[in-house]
Amino acid sequence: MPPTIFDYFQPLSDGSKETLVNYNKSGAVNELAQALTRDEYKNLLPQPDRANLANRDAALAWLCGLIPTAANRAGEWRLYFVRNYVQGWIKTRYPGNAQAAELAAKIGAQIMNAKGLKPTMDYYTEVRGVTVPDGNQFKPEYDAHVKKSWAGVKRVGWRGDDRDPDIMMKSGFAPRVSINVPVWRPQAGKEDVDLDTTVCVARDIRGSAFFPLSKPVQFSWAYCVLIKEGWNTYYLQKKLADSKDLQPNTPAYNKTVWMFHEKCVNQVAPQDIVIAVQLERRIFDGNDPLTGIQFRLISTTGRTNFRAVANLEAEQKQKIDETLSEFTKGWYPSSPNKWLTYDGVVTK
């Protein structure tokens, strides 16, 4: 098979690998906190303390409180937790309690997996940054089609998020872990950018309605944003499909190429958030948005950045107005047995 642009994406620097490792170690503590909200974990504690594990945030606070020294509970305490956890933290708090000792062992088993994360692990040596070196045969293609500066209506994108506009219009959007360029995962079945390393935006508002993917929330927000400079992941997805000889309008192609035209950027500054409109959705199986959704925009709930609107070009404003007009009319798809999926609108 002839080489493709993916073969020449650059390995991560040692610093970027370390950043990713630390991010995933902190994520392991978040996952542990979520596990602690389940009865099989929290019921191992005395009854009065079970309330301290009512939700993930409460469980995180309980885990942080296990760290013996206040100074080590400040800042990025989750990394300290992974590096230093011992079962004695729990056994000391609940002396002689066999069930608490069992919980301490359960936590220890999960933390050992996180302790084993190292920059030399296969995942971190196999993933690549979405960039190619100067002088490479694919550099002209990269400069022309992958790393982009967008103008005009192509700057208009949509991002789905359940965080409130009062927060996001002050903070903007940034990657969960920032290493300057998105990470490309070459592993079979995962060939795409790592969503935690970039800010993804859909040119087609329908794509934003699937998010958050991980939570079956009924209400979220459709954020209209302006993107300036970033990476054309839609182009990369099409190149990947071409390299695998996948044919359009087939399940394999649709799994590889997101039909809602994805782009990604390092950040969306607060001044580039134009409008936020509350989005209501129905999920086909009640849990996983990928099984199908129906959605509508609730125009009376919008937030507008009037300064950003004032600076819009006429074509951009028209595009946004047309989109809002179409999806505030009612549910999309409008038929009760039609559902929007990554394959388009299907009948179920």
Image: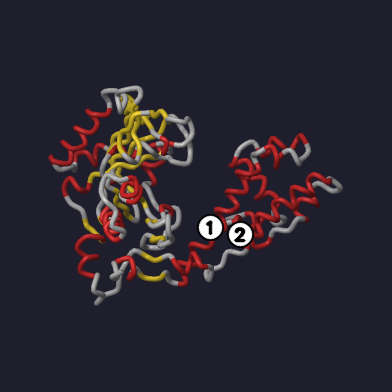
Q: Tell me the amino acid under the disc marked 1.
A: Asn
Task: Look at 74% across and 47% down and name the residue there.
Answer: 103
Q: Which amino acid does label 2 sit on?
A: Ala
Q: Position of residue 105 (x, y in %)?
A: 74, 53
Residue drawn at x 67%, y 45% is: 62
How far separated are the C-alphas under marks 1 and 2?
A: 8 Å
Residue ranking furthest to the bottom: 135
Image quadrant in which the N terminus is located:
bottom left
Q: Look at mark 2 in the image and give the residue it sits on.
A: 114
Which is nearer the eye, 150 or 9?
A: 9
Label 2 sits on a secondary structure element that is: helix
Q: In which quarter of the image is residue 197?
A: bottom left
Please say if the residues under marks 1 and 2 sit with CB atoms less than 8 Å apart: yes
Report x, y in % for residue 284.
43, 30
The circle drawn on residue 24 is: 1
State whether residue 228 is above or below residue 8. Answer: above
Q: Please, which colouring scheme is shown? A: secondary structure
Q: Can residue 230 be seen in this view?
A: no
**Label 1 Cα neighbours within 10 Å, binned few <14 / some 14-19 / many ≥20:** some
Q: How busy is the neighbourhood of tag 2: few (under 14 within 10 Å), some, or many (20 plus)?
A: many
Taking 315 as reference, is 172 left or right? right
138 with respect to 67 (left or right): left
Q: Give the residue at the far left of this rendering.
A: 314
Of residues 128 and 249, which is closer to you in this image?
A: 249
Residue 132 image position (x, y, % from top left): 30, 70
Query: What percent of the width, then of the height, locates residue 281?
Result: 39, 29
Using the image as rendered, state which of residue 190 and residue 19 is in the foreground. Answer: 190
Task: Tell me: residue 83, above or below residue 156.
Answer: below
Determine the residue positioned at 32% across, 25% down. Answer: 331
Task: Report the disc number at residue 81.
Answer: none
